Amino acid sequence: MTAIGATMSLFVEGLLYRGREGHLSYIGHRLAGLGTLLFLAIHIVDTSSVYFGALLGVPEMYSHAIDIYRSPLFMVGEIVLVAAVIYHGINGLKIILHDTFPHWWNKGFERQSFWKVVAMTLLLWAPAAYLMGRSLYLHSICRCPPVETADVTASTNFAVTAIPLLFFAILAVLIVGGKLLAPAPAGRRVAAPPKTLDTHIWQFMRWSGVLLIPLVWIHVAIQDVLVGVHAIDLDFVALRWATLGWRLYDIALLGFAFGHAILGLRNVTNDYLANPVWNRRVKWLLIIGWLVITAIGAVAIVGGVMRPE
Amino acid sequence: MKVTLKIKRFNPEADQKPHWESYPVEVEPTERLLDALHQVKWFQDGTLALRRSCAHGICGSDTMRINGGNRLACKVLMQDIVKDGGTVTVEPMLGLKVIKDLIVDLEPFFAHYRSVMPYVVNDEALPEDGRERLQSPEARERFDQGTKCILCAACTTACPSFWSNSTYVGPAAIVQAHRFIFDDRDRATDERLAVLNEQFGVWRCRTVFNCTEACPRDIPVTQLIGEVKRALATGRVE
Ligand code: HEM
Ligand code: HEM
Ligand code: FES
């Protein structure tokens, strides 16, 4: 008990430590990552009901799930989720840049970078929050849903073009002001030491992070912001999955987003579970949870939308 | 100026847990926090326990949390941390066991320091003159930043990864490793890199920058850690 109490008070004192922008950026990155993970785990399972619902004899399972997404409380949560996904993505890109070019960074630039990340997050989030807030207002408060429904094709085309462009714009903003293209200090070459599991995981976090910006952002922009949860139902999913490309896309999303997040949670586990026995047990749980949820999601994507006979 | 020092006290023989005590002191704005602490210890309460030796920012013994962040008490001027009539909080470093008041057990910190072999390893024959191994100024410059370290532990005890799990080798030990990994006279690069490649080596770094902000010697700690990560990932020690 005292051990847990001591850990807790250390944790709280750590949060209160007078760090600077970097400390805030770290706390925000972790909160956003873990929050999105919580959503994602639930989301994969409930989306899979498009396949498993009919199989289990509860064909209305998916529409129940979507009803929850449409509740006002959940819609507020989705607006926050979008902020988390934007912040975590941009800040993640900042971390990746730092790790690739550490000599571009000094502490002044790091402080400045944090505010750039915050500014870009707000800038991108504002229009999304407006659209989602409007949908929340129309559906839940004034109860006067718009008659015209979102144009799925136009929304999709817009997201697919705009987000890759945004990616490069963000990259440019993050780089400006650093000791750009300063050559790495002179040095020598040694044989690269054999990679450990942790080297691979660290590198995967970075490659997957870069990939996830287009993958997650396009997905969220289409589903949550432009089309919106009120236009999503079994037919919508069936229509999307009629295109093989979107199925492959969802498979990639499933693999990279959930894999990235579970490995992120492994980092967090190494932080807070110092006891080697518990540390190992929880990591086994993570592996099992990852395999089971990924399998459920993958079977649904391959199986597709199932309707009762 | 008149200010209050609010100090976190802990006496292992009497206390269950730490508590705060306040001491009014009168100091010149240009005096250092260490002078104010001396006033308390010498004239008000001799039981206050703290470490300091050189009092000039060289020995690295008086790191503490000052107004919530790690600093050397002997390098902080009162005028930079408090206004007349204000309060300064002083606490021991975070993440190491408190022995008494502001004194923490630094052994885990030094164990990590030793684990990276903080000395040049070179068993090759000496140069012909039998004296020193000469090094070009550029090669010496390459690891100059790391040589400034005074092992005050301000960086390591500012690091969230270290607070939550002190198995992490920590920024100071990585800076020390960097100082030898990037020294072209050294021949133990592989061994040092292997230590840092472990699960609780350099990969625990989350690029928080608390270490860089805390360093009283202005060492770009996070950058040096980044360079070690890169060396591990690519084999380029550059
Ligand atoms: C949108 C693009 C994304 C990028 C660029 C990105 C980037 C990163 C990077 C670089 C890290 C490593 C941080 C470090 O080592 O200090 C990380 C950690 C993490 N990511 Fe992501 N990520 C993205 C999306 C996601 C998503 C969608 C999730 C959840 C579903 C997620 C969950 C996590 C978690 C839980 C961590 C661990 C946080 C920590 O250790 O503090 N990430 N991310
Ligand atoms: C509230 C916002 C979101 C909505 C409304 C939403 C909607 C949907 C819909 C309708 C599908 C069905 C397949 C499709 O149409 O392509 C789906 C699948 C999927 N979504 Fe989302 N999504 C949201 C957020 C996210 C986020 C933030 C992530 C990743 C971090 C994500 C990851 C996935 C994955 C992996 C699948 C495939 C699920 C499976 O295998 O069963 N979604 N989403
Ligand atoms: S007393 Fe020596 S560094 Fe402060």
Image (cartoon, helix red, strand yellow):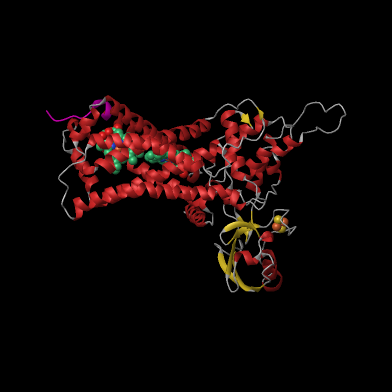
Q: Quadrant of residue B129?
A: top right
Residue depicted at 48% across the width and 33% down the height: A201
x and y percentages locating residue A109 in the rendered image: 55, 47
Say left or right for A129 vs B237.
left
A36 or A118, nearer to the observer = A118
The x and y percentages for residue B131 are 86, 32
A169 versus B237 height, above or below:
below
Magenta span: chief secondary structure? loop
Quarter of the image for residue A284 reads top left
Residue lying farthest to the right in this orientation = B129
Residue A268 visible here: no
- Image side of residue A45 versus residue A212, left or right: left
State whether residue B25 is above or below residue A126.
Answer: below
Residue B8 at x, y percent in the picture = 58, 64
Let me know if residue A305 is in the magenta part: yes
Please say if A207 is above or below B155: above
The answer to whether residue A205 is seen in the rendering is yes
Residue closest to the eye, A16 or A117: A117
In which quadrant of this rendering is ligand 1 seen?
A: top left
Left or right of A72, for residue A9: right
Locate residue A18, reporting x and y percent.
Answer: 54, 57
Magenta stretch contains residue B26 = no
Q: Which of A155 and B192 is in front in this view?
A: A155
**Region in magenta:** A300-309
Q: How many marks?
A: 0
The quarter of the image holding the C terminus of chain A is top left
Give the residue displayed 28% in from the left and 35% down from the top.
Answer: A156
User: For this view, does B203 lie left or right of residue A256?
Assistant: right
